[in-house]
Image (cartoon, helix red, strand yellow):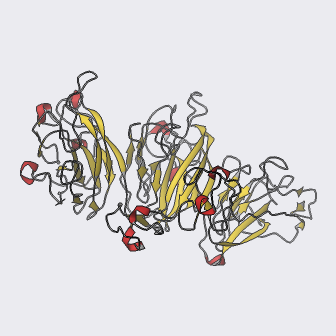
Amino acid sequence: RVMLNLGSGGNQNDADGAGAARLETWSRGYGNLSGVCAPYAGSLAGVFMGTGGANDPQPPELNFVVGSLGTNFPSLSPLLNQVFFIGDGRTGDGVGPTQVFYAPWVATTLFLGIADIALYPSGPGNFQDNTGNFTVSVNISSGIVYPTCGNSSVRCLGGFIANDPGTVCSSTTCTHSDCCTAPGEEHIQHLEVVVSADRNIYGAGLSYGPAVSAGGGQPPVAIAVHGGDVLRFSVSGRVILNLNGWRGNENGADGVRAIVSEHIPGYGNLSGIWALSAGYLAGVFLGEAGAIGPRPAELEFQSSQELVLSLTPLLNQVFFIGDGRTGDGAGATQVFYAPFGSATLFLGIVDAPNYHGGPGAFLDNTGNFTVIVNISSGIVYPVCGNSNVTCLSGFFANDAGTVCSSTTCTHSDCCTAAIQLFEVIVSADRNIYGAEMCYGPGPHSASIGRPPVAVPVHSGEVLRFSVTGRVCLNQQGSSCENQNNADGVGAPSQETCVYGYAELSWIWAPNAGFLTGVFVPPLGTFAPQPAMLDFRNIGTDFPSLSPLLNQVFFIGDGRTGDGAGATQVFYAPSGAATLYLGIADAPRYQGDPGAFEDNRGNFTVSV
């Protein structure tokens, strides 16, 4: 036990801080060591440091107060220089399971001590009247026993991380190389954090949660990342967004059972987000300097059918995480790529008064999500020809076989810097002429469909597409005889001509129901309607295409032939901010946009 202020007497406390005179301690940090907020004073704390010592950057502070991380976490992976609560090393005060702490990559030393302050809150101080001791026993393992690999005797050596269960070996004679992955490959960092319902995602990079009204809550939880990191999430728990209102709207991480859909137009330099539900887990990546630079386009998660398999958000672009799977509590694990220049991932909740408008209404939120994050710093890509090639942070593996097929491939052969990969689903009712709108336009309101799917882009970017799936443009009842692929092959019409709408151009192309795109400038920026592209003359087998702003163009399956041929290359025009993907349809396949009411099916598009 220790006593923090001998002069006043009577406030001896244990390693968890229980018995201390003060119920909360908030140290603001010092030098390059982070601050820390703990529920009691006098608790045992720790900090990992690497070879850079205090010269490494100061990470975000951890908050162990109840409602944030708490002190009953099962495991914790602090960052270098990030001061953290240890207490008595158990989930309860003197009781409960033993907690597990993971040393961060390149850590060389763990320091143990007390976080004390002169005033609340402030920097360190006031140690002159402290007395007493903690006796600390530390058990250090150089790896992780992973019996689900098939052999419980396999122990990953220092610097190696255990693979996912069953991914490599399922026998009872697995070796170290079967079960463990070397540094620089998968599973470099495993984190488990608690995100409470008052964690405002729009407080990313701030010391508070901003709000237009009804309380801004706390800032979101911060996790250090690097550009090119590959992240996978497993999320459990439930929250309630309005405890004092309807009591039946407890929802999971996907927001299922929340009251309504939600639209936030953004705040500061952080983008807006539009989702089918409310109360879901959200994230945003920021760079070293925080939320600087232009506000990116908002991402729209307006359909349960559009749960992406993988996503590469931009810096400052708020995105949906949910439970980290393609379905609600089921489906494949989704993959998220940290954009080039990332330094921190923030995790929090999107909320607003009446679920629309600027952030706020966090005062009546309760509950928590427990979030497990697996972060990989590179991808082993043996199909490049050399299984020893690992793409470093900020690099992505090239398409299989496109560059190198020998057994002596190098990093530059197999890996490309700063490539973004999006995988989205474009349903047959996505009207390409609804770009920048919240509906699909046309003269016939009953058949205008929904707006197209948005993908953020920049001027001069080079895009390649891979498209699968089939759609039906005029389904009657449960049957459809004219299903077509992304090139429009199989559609009932020999050609489609859709008149332009507002600033968007006409398009004329062979077949019907094909995948189309259009590049548009930032919202509120005017660009005139350009000339029509006539793909009856251009053909659909072009090797490359440079559309103008607002010029609707043919994408098809992204190859020069129907399901075959070379991959086509598309160049984003100067001033482009968003690429929209959708379908060009019209009554009898010619005229104003429309006739979407009987369209069914989807295209899966990799960009």
View extreme (left): residue = 537
Residue 567 position within the rendered picture, expressed as x and y whole percent measured from the top left: 24, 57
Residue 205 visible: no
Q: Which residue is drawn at the image coordinates 38% and 44% (left, top)?
A: 300
Tell me which residue sits at (83%, 70%) in the image: 127
Residue 540: tell me if it is visible: yes
Residue 24 is left or right of residue 551, and the answer is right
Q: Nearer the viewer, residue 8 or 430?
A: 430
Q: Is residue 28 above or below residue 307?
A: below
Estimate the x, y position of residue 486 in percent, counting from the top left.
Answer: 23, 43
Residue at point 22% right, 58% down?
Answer: 566
Q: Nearer the viewer, residue 137 or 364?
A: 137
Q: x and y percent of residue 345 in the render? A: 52, 58
Classify residue 495 as left or right of residue 38.
left
541 or 431: which is nearer to us? Answer: 541
Residue reaching furthest to the top: 477
> In the image, 117: left or right of 193?
right
Tell me the quadrant of the picture where the C terminus can be found: bottom left
* 410 w.r.t. 319: above or below: below
